[in-house]
Image: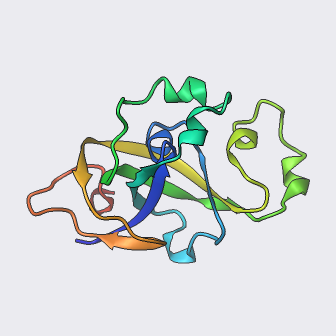
Amino acid sequence: MAIPTLTVRQPWASLIIAGFKIIENRSWPPPAKYMGKRIAIHAGGMLELEALDQPWVKPYIAKLPNPMPRGAVIGTVMIDKGTIPPGDLVNLGKRDRGDPLLEWWTPDHHGWMLCDPRAFSEPVRAQGNMGIWMWEPPEGFCDEFLPEHE
């Protein structure tokens, strides 16, 4: 069974699966057919080195596996039914200063609200792709975190 999958660069992919990063910033909104559904997260081959030096990211990075997996599907996450459109400063102004959303959302992007991350016991090597793409788990792969078990 093919699973909708999103490739995300590291360290962001691991931060999503660890439950720290609750917003994924994209130039496009999440497709309506995936809202409220579970998708797989593929850790891309690239590592954004500048992200590792961001003071607000460093405490979270210290809690991630080292090295972070790359070129692999590492778990699944739900795309919540809510999304934040670009420039939604009205709703942003209603949030408390300590709201984690303020750390993760880029105001000129669509903020995909993510929830219920579930890490695979082991990363599964895979070639990534742009946009949401369909990943075919290897034969014999069985994980309770795949969408068919929901």
> Where residue 5 sits: x, y (%)?
39, 65
**Which residue is drawn at the image coordinates 85% and 53% (left, top)?**
91
**Which residue is drawn at the image coordinates 53% and 46% (left, top)?**
48
Front-most of 51 and 18? 51
Tell me: residue 64, above or below residue 114.
Answer: above
**Which residue is drawn at the image coordinates 34% and 73% (left, top)?**
134
Front-most of 53 and 85? 53
Task: Using the rendered view, name the quadrant where residue 85 is placed.
Answer: bottom right
> Where residue 9 sits: x, y (%)?
48, 52
Task: Using the rendered view, name the quadrant where residue 128 is placed.
Answer: bottom left
Tell me: residue 18, above or below residue 133.
Answer: above
* On-image quarter of the C terminus: bottom left
Horizontal relation, residue 32 to residue 14: left or right: right
**Which residue is drawn at the image coordinates 46% and 71% (left, top)?**
130
> Where residue 12 sits: x, y (%)?
52, 45
What is the basis of the colouring in this image? Answer: rainbow
* On-image quarter of the N terminus: bottom left
> Where residue 89 sits: x, y (%)?
88, 55
Q: Residue furthest front?
A: 49
Horizontal relation, residue 137 to residue 150: left or right: left
Q: Residue furthest left?
A: 140
Total of numbered circles in the picture? 0
